[in-house]
Amino acid sequence: MSDVIVVGAGPTGVMLANELKLQGVDVVVLDKDLEPNPMVRSMGLHARGIEIMEMRGLLDRLLPQGTKYPTDGFFAGIRTSEPVELATTHPYTLGIPQPLVEGALRARADELGVEIRRGVEAVGVSQDDDGVDVELSDGTTMRAAWVVGCDGGRSAVRRLLNIAFPGESARRQWLLGEAELTTPLDEVMTVITRVHETHRGFGAGPVGDGVYRIVVPAAEVVDEGAPQPTLDDLRTQLTAYAGTDFGVHSPRWLSRFGDATRLAERYRVGRVLIAGDAAHVHPPQGGQGLNLGMQDAFNLGWKLAATVRGTAPEGLLDTYESERHPVAAEVLTVTRAQAELQSPEPGPQAVRTLLAEAMEFPGVHAHLLGKVTSLGIRYAVGPGSDLLGRRQRDVTFASGGRLYPLLHNARGVLVDQTGVLSAEGWADRVDLVAERSDDLEVPALLLRPDGHIVWVGDGGTGLRESLERWFGAPAA
């Protein structure tokens, strides 16, 4: 019997498994596909996703494989005359195909000893007070204390739990794929620039070895179970929008995606939880899907690990849904809005023009980018300082060391510039860092393993209560 079974070996599932394994939890990942999916569903990490990777020591693996882009234009493609200065040491978007991000996560899983079983599909879930039985497609059954469904928008785990998934079906769809073009690059980009002026859901760009990543509006909206598009479908739609098919040939893969928008009514049923696309789907505008799922895993991992180990305070696991469900709801709002603003229809274009004017006012563009990058998230951790519930940006200490490397092992951190505080009793869960930094706004603060602030002060008042609230009772 395992501690946790994670269903789905995509970025959310593997990220969660890594978080659990860092805390000593026995975890098994199941995936119905025999090989990792080569489709490039996402092309980048936003600032908060980059910070998460750095907090777990993975960013150095990704930076050489990606390209840094300014964040301007990531809200509905609207650019302003003045760039926004984001409050982060990573004020950029890292352009990197999703398979490379997944590859880095899997490499880390191998190092940690995470077991990933492929070609294994979950077809049944039943639970009792002590654990969960997962029925597999080969007729066998696995048992674990907890199960987490990270198995995508068509999640079998969510359906087996009968969790409602309200929202809207797709109204628009696009064809997406990677293929070679015979038309020279300069001609391709000239046509793309012209068409993109009126059809923002159209584009093509080189990804190496003569291959282009292509996206073009589909001819019609089809059901979820429809066959994947063909090369002829792609040629037809390219010609319809660009007047040429660019001599497209030799596709690596072709797929279809839409703007369906749905949010699970709840994230937990007993000992089974859901995360990532299993819990929410939304339009692709703004590129938030990959980032949102990894943030779910980052929030859930340490809480579930503490529950497995028996150190979690009462109600800690419930904060996963209470914190992440509202975040997903806001992402759905933001992506819906961007999808409408990119419509070529006169009404949305009029709103787009007015919003572009408003974004020139100080603070408006920064506020919207805070939603896209997730830097503006503030969890409801209790009354007090405006810093409470916000993520702590990386800082440099007087010794020359930095804060984020101290979070590599997914433990809490008490940063004390006063030299009088103690985390005695929680040394097995919280590290004390008695160092000074000119970048910190307060004398002392307590961070959860996900880097969010849960206590600030200049003395010990309230510290013990916060340690017990987030890390459980002190050790004997």
Image (tube, rainbow, N blue to C red):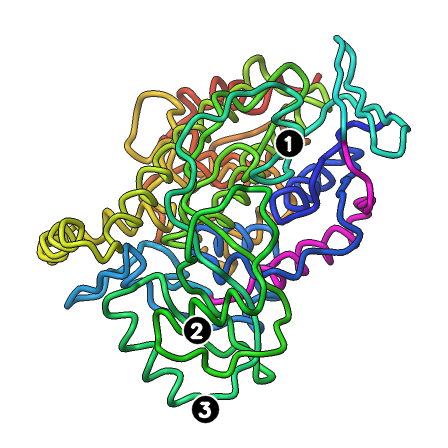
- The reply, left or right, for residue 459 in relation to residue 80 is right
Cβ–Cβ under 8 Å for marks 1 and 2: no
Measure how far apart labels 2 and 3 are at the Cα level: 12 Å
* Residue occupying image coordinates x 16% and y 55%: 349
Q: Nearer the viewer, residue 402 or 186?
A: 186
Q: CA distance from mark 1 to mark 3?
A: 57 Å
- The mark closer to the camera, 1 or 2, is 2
On the image, the x and y values in percent for residue 256 come to 52, 54
Quarter of the figure with residue 27: top right
In reply to whether residue 121 is colored magenta, the answer given is yes
Residue 343 position in % (x across, y down): 25, 54
The span from disc 1 to disc 2 (Cα, nearest Å) is 48 Å
Say which amino acid is labelled 1: Arg
Sequence-wise first label, 2 or 3 = 3
Q: Quadrant of the C terminus?
A: top right
Judging by the rendered image, the residue that carries numbered circle 2 is 204
Tag 3 residue: 184
Residue type at the position of mark 3: Pro
